[in-house]
Amino acid sequence: MINILEVNETNKMIEQEKLDVRTITLGISLFDCCDADLDTLNRNIYDKITRLARDLVSTGREIELEYGIPIVNKRISVTPIALVAGRACRSPEDFVTVAETLDRAARDTGVNFLGGYSAIVSKGMTPTDEALIRSIPAALAATGRICSSVNIGSTKTGINMDAVKLMGEIVRETAEATKENNSIGCTKLVVFCNAPDDNPFMAGAFHGVSEADAVINVGVSGPGVIKHALEDIRGENFEVLCETVKRTAFKVTRAGQLVAQEASERLGIPFGIVDLSLAPTPFVGDSVAGILEEMGLESVGAPGTTAALALLNDQVKKGGIMASSFVGGLSGAFIPVSEDQGMIDAVNRGALTIEKLEAMTCVCSVGLDMIAIPGDTPATTISGIIADEAAIGMINNKTTAVRLIPVIGKDVGDNVEFGGLLGHAPVQRINRFGCADFINRGGRIPAPIHSFKN
């Protein structure tokens, strides 16, 4: 049970250290919306989402007011649309109408984002999967609140290199389709390896096929809380450092557990998981980079950065697991460049490169996230970066992801403003040597030997 003493203890973290519940995400299954008629499918989808989510935003606000815990976003995730719309959608244009329906449902329920315009193609693509993927640029250009993701590999299946090649092209096309707004469509498109079923965080959220008809997932974030705790133990050894991170993560997760339980009870929808992820914001004092530098690094990107991040990620997970019986999603540390002022500063001072970020993704919770790259980057180069990141996830049996933004008309050294929690980013230099012959081979990279555990 969570008692009022724990609630009071969180007040200091909220008021002084930027603790927040980053999102309440309502996951909704759309399997019972399937229909061969496109108009009926769209009507079924709209009706179910608006029925189940009609009180989501108001309930979140009530909990905020009652407990004083900021809930930054109220979101919805749905069953991957490629699994739902195949009978009715026979072309990319058909899928765009579904995206517009989802966007209308998101707007009418008042949520910030809706995720699940997605396909799972880790071993192969059906014609339906390919049609949805090819619709992504137009769908993200035509909507404001829809997020899209594609899972192109897993430890069990290997990497679908045909899908990797296609996604490089789709990222480029999405950048072109939204170039009038700094290619912002790419900020809502994630390419995964080993995507989890219960991720409440956008842009990669979708409602997994193993989930119930509806669930409440909560994502908690508190980089500022961790950093503040570490300020009090400067110079102490690693044992003290680890224990401090773990204990602080425990407290942060308990706040999330409280919100999740309250939202579940008030909405009459089962509780799913708490995701404790140190997801930064562009605001000063709310930075994962700041935590790593508080550990003793002169700058993120310096030697020791990967070790410090590994320590942080592991202790956050240990603290979270002790605080809740249902910790899931992507729990750990995120390293999105545009959303973390400390990361931005490190890039600008020349301490942090995309190659170092890739090394850090071996031990963080996601991957190469919110990285602006030159707008003229070839699609095959983007595919190569996706393939590298997927290989890290496949071999290490962990979730990895890529959210690259080739900003049309921008080059290395330019700064790009996305706004809100998406922040701003310097355009980073990437390796200009080509990989087209490798990407164009086609087929699959097989699963690693250690995947055979049956």
Image: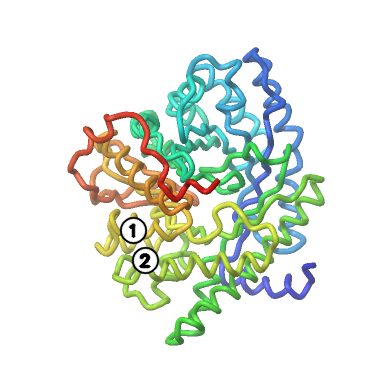
> Which residue is painted at 46% across and 33% down in the image?
123
Disc 1 designates what residue? 359
Tag 1: amino acid: Ala
- Residue 172 appears in the picture as rendered: no
Kindly state the secondary structure of the residue where label 2 is placed.
helix
What is the spatial separation of the Cα atoms under label 1 and label 2, in whole angstroms?
7 Å
Task: Report the number of discs.
Answer: 2
How packed mark 1 is, by other alpha carbons closer than 10 Å (few <14, some 14-19, many 20 or more), is some
Relative vertical location of residue 99 with respect to residue 239 in this rendering, above or below: above
Locate residue 160 relative to residue 326 in the image: left or right. Answer: left
Quarter of the image with the N terminus in it: bottom right
Residues under numbered marks 1 and 2 in contact, where contact means CB atoms less than 8 Å apart:
yes
Instruction: Give percent across and percent down for residue 118.
Output: 53, 33
Of residues 368 and 413, the one drawn nearer to the viewer in this rendering: 368
Q: Amino acid at mark 2?
A: Thr
Q: Is residue 237 above or below residue 145?
A: below
In which quarter of the view is residue 439 placed?
Answer: top left
Identify whether 68 is placed above or below 190: below
Give the percent coordinates (x, y) of residue 373.
29, 45
Q: Is residue 169 left or right of residue 16?
A: left
Q: Which residue is mark 2?
A: 306
Q: Classify residue 384 as left or right of residue 163.
A: left
Where is the C terminus found, in terms of image quarters? top right
The residue depicted at 67 percent of the width and 17 percent of the height is 35
Q: Report which quarter residue 49 is drawn in.
A: top right
Which residue does the image show at 66% across and 68% down from the upper left? 322
439 and 377: which is toward the camera: 439
Q: Secondary structure at mark 1?
A: helix
Between discs 1 and 2, the one toward the N terminus: 2
